[in-house]
Amino acid sequence: MTGKEQGIEQESVDLSLEELYQKYRKYSFAIAYRMLGTVTDAEDVVQDCFVELENKPLNDIQNPKAYVAKMTMNRCLNLLNSARKQRETYVGQWLPEPLGESADLPAEWLERKDMISYAFLVLLEQLKPIERAVFVLREAFQYDYKDIAELLGKTESNCRQLFSRSRRILSSGESVLAAPASNPQNNAARIKLLERFTSAFLAYDVTAMLELLAEQPAFVADGGGNVHTVMRPMVVRKGVLALLTSRRVLTALRERELVHTVINGELQLAFLQEGKVKEALCIRLTPDGEHIQDFYLMINPDKLGHIHVSQEGANKL
């Protein structure tokens, strides 16, 4: 079977713990990052899974891939349920942690460029933990409902209902995957738009910025209480325009070196100071690719550690 009905690969192999770790560590991380939206938590989940395996007879594991997926998902669900309470005390708006182009992902995913877009990672925050689990396994990992039910301890019917509900909640029409940054056509159009935005932003050009904005754009910033920034999402076109062309707001960004770099599989903007990423701006385009629908500004220094811009890879704007 192929596509979304390919299910879990059936395998029963005699692997050592080190071999299991080398083979499935990145796969576990890929699941955990999509579930949690933070690199550090995803890495902790992966580590915990393989520490637990140290005390388990490996010969009892009939399907290592499925077993690692189930362990990973269970830990993620536990973390998400507790994280909701923690995020209630988070200062300002919480955004997922962006991943740079050197993301720790399975080799086959890097080859296919099946990287989840940052905008979609934001949208996933609308789902309840179990809804997110079903959606991630089905849409991002192409598991069939039978396997999802086995992994989550649900019925196939329940998983279908959860997936349908998730699709309704996320009814944006946006693909779960990023438009591959390796595609020359995608690159050319996106670079042109980034250049237009940068020019308008640096020049406080109201007319040019207005031409770029969608009819109902949104601007969200995450400072985590560590730095001063816009505390609440701006969802009115007039307000977003005023914010992006104000001479009193976001002034630090205009003092940086602006480059475009790959974040979550797509070209985005990074703001550098002495070669270090100080802010990152991820944009979501309208379906036609002509206007900017959403802006996600990451200023929280705790969430910028996995964006590295090399001198060779940086494209100045």
Image: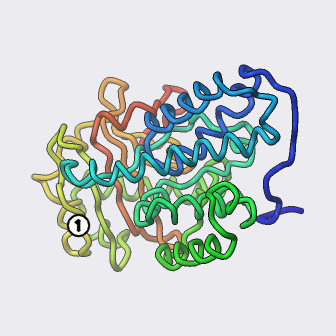
Question: Where is mark 1, residue-wise?
Answer: 234
Q: Residue at x 52, y 49 (%)?
A: 267
In the rendered structure, which amino acid carries the disc numbered 1?
Met
Toward the left, the furthest residue is: 248
Q: Looking at the picture, how far across and down is residue 269, in whole percent? A: 41, 46
Q: Residue at x 63, y 38 (%)?
A: 105
Q: Looking at the picture, how far across and down is residue 315, in whole percent? A: 49, 38
Q: Is residue 229 visible?
A: yes
Q: Is residue 175 left or right of residue 247?
A: right
Q: Is residue 129 above or below residue 218?
A: above
Q: Is residue 63 above or below residue 180?
A: above
Please tell me which residue lies in front, 87 or 288: 87
Q: Looking at the picture, how far across and down is residue 193, in whole percent? A: 46, 59
Callout 1: SS: loop
Query: Which quadrant of the figure has residue 208?
Result: bottom left
Q: Is residue 300 above or below residue 172?
A: above
Q: Is residue 243 left or right of residue 148?
A: left
Q: Residue at x 48, y 72 (%)?
A: 286
Q: Looking at the picture, how far across and down is residue 169, in whole percent? A: 47, 76
Q: Is residue 113 above or below residue 286?
A: above
Please tell me which residue lies in front, 171 or 249: 171
For the C terminus, the image quarter is top left
Query: Which quadrant of the figure has residue 50?
Result: top right
Q: How is the image coloured?
A: rainbow
Q: Residue at x 70, y 44 (%)?
A: 109
Q: Is residue 102 visible?
A: no
For the N terminus, the image quarter is bottom right
